Amino acid sequence: MSKVYMQDGRLVVPDCVTVPFIEGDGVGAEITPVCQQIVNEAVKQAYSGKRSIEWKEVLAGGKAFEQTGEWLPEATMDAFREYLIGIKGPLTTPVGGGIRSLNVALRQTLDLYVCLRPVRWFRGVVSPVKEPEKVDMHIFRENTEDIYAGIEWEQGTPEAKKFYAFLRDEMGVKKVRFPETSSFGVKPVSVEGTKRLVRAAILYALQHKLPSVTLVHKGNIMKFTEGGFKRWGYEVAETEFADRTFTMNQYNQLKKDSGEASAKAALTDAVNAGKVIIKDCIADAFLQNTLLIPKEYSVVATLNLNGDYISDQLAAMVGGIGIAPGANINYLTGHAIFEATHGTAPDIAGKNVVNPCSLLLSSVMMLEYLGWKEAAVLITNALEKLFGAGVATADLARFMPAGKALGTKEFGQRVVESL
Ligand code: NAD
């Protein structure tokens, strides 16, 4: 039996796991084999050959289109459905096809409602901030709702006119500044969508013994969508995790009822008792704070669009997209796709210079998800050693004072040797 499956809400992982993988377009053909070699070796060393991964190639993107005439064949979706987990290299966005984005199609089909992006700094990697070691965050970006739902109409079309007429005539909306030339988009944010995301973030904080979850929103302006996210997020903590969390809502209520000293004492007690502190921050202030006081933040739960901006800013603070990992997860069904977060990098494809670490650290996330922590640690320790000694691919090595730039394959080989 080589399939991962869910039983009573828990993932059951056999010793030999089949992992469907999409090689990826552009640089995908260079990073995928390098990562697989490293992961195979780490698993072999960590479990003395008792555990292993059987890689099963499935097609998507340009390679799929060439071979099957389809960008995302049904057989690929079936494999992800069947094996629960999978990993993918970057995919070309089809131009003019029926699919807007292959990544979005994958997320929607499997209802992968969490986009998880852990962000940490590796000693040796040059960062634009003074104290990158203070950046250690885990972003839970909602993946199925918000303005990303793809409900929009282009200006000048009959649909945009009809939508505006509905707004004006049925809803009494008078605030559209230039109605004749406006495009329109709809931003759905639901109670269920918010609560399952925030629930996952709190559970993750509890499991990993992390100190806080920050709900990042723009609820001061968008009161029912982003404001709803904040309210429903606090509600999850206060109703479902009452004994394991302490919220800033509760802090403020105590402060009002019994004074600041009582509120502060309750907060200190909660921290000492190992409770997860649930707080919130307005998105623009949050982006500023990540630069000024990054240590204040640990797990971050946010909506789709905010999450997009936040992920890239935080990635830039610790070394850029070449080393930023990510995963799309449905914690209820167990489905998870781990992915390189960068694109196909056509400008450097085929030159053996691409950094494989985004996909490699996503593979580390996959090992952690499977519960194979020992193998995951071997790889992160190897990367710490190499970056600390200035050994990296050109994108990182060129900024390191004593940087030694290696090709993709050569860097991969050094990781294997350093395990
Ligand atoms: P990109 O991420 O491919 O490249 C942006 C820049 O970063 C390029 O200069 C590239 O050389 C560099 N870069 C990216 N990854 C790197 C790595 N691992 N090591 C070293 N340098 C790296 O973004 P783009 O050029 O805007 O997009 C190219 C294609 O990729 C487009 O078709 C786009 O739609 C697609 N794309 C796919 C994904 C995905 O599959 N997750 C994400 C973003 C873009």
Image: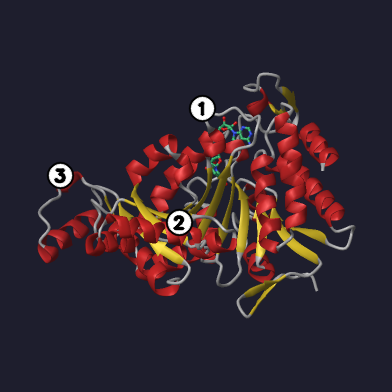
Q: Residue at x 28, y 63 (%)?
A: 254
Which three-letter amino acid code belongs to the residue tagged 3? Phe
Which three-letter amino acid code belongs to the residue tagged 1? Pro
Instruction: Determine which residue is flagged by label 3.
Output: 178
Res 208 seen here: yes
Q: Nearer the viewer, residue 344 or 250?
A: 250
> Of label 3 and label 1, which has the lower sequence position?
1
Q: Residues within 10 Å of mark 2 (few under 14, many from 20)?
A: many
Color encoding of the figure = secondary structure
In the rendered structure, are the residues bearing label 2 and label 1 in contact, judged by CB atoms less than 8 Å apart?
A: no
Q: Secondary structure at mark 1?
A: loop
**Residue 164 in the figure: left or right of residue 314:** left
Q: Residue at x 41, y 35 (%)?
A: 292
Figure quadrant, ligand 1: top right
Q: Determine whether 334 is above or below 114 in the image.
A: below
Q: Residues within 10 Å of mark 3 (few under 14, many from 20)?
A: few
Q: Quadrant of the C terminus?
A: top right
Gap between marks 2 and 1, in whole Å? Answer: 25 Å
**Residue 23 in the figure: left or right of residue 248:** right
Gap between marks 3 and 2, in whole Å? Answer: 40 Å
Instruction: Determine which residue is flagged by label 1.
Output: 128
Q: Residues within 10 Å of mark 1 (few under 14, many from 20)?
A: few
Which three-letter amino acid code belongs to the residue tagged 2? Val
Residue 286 placed where, x, y %? 37, 43
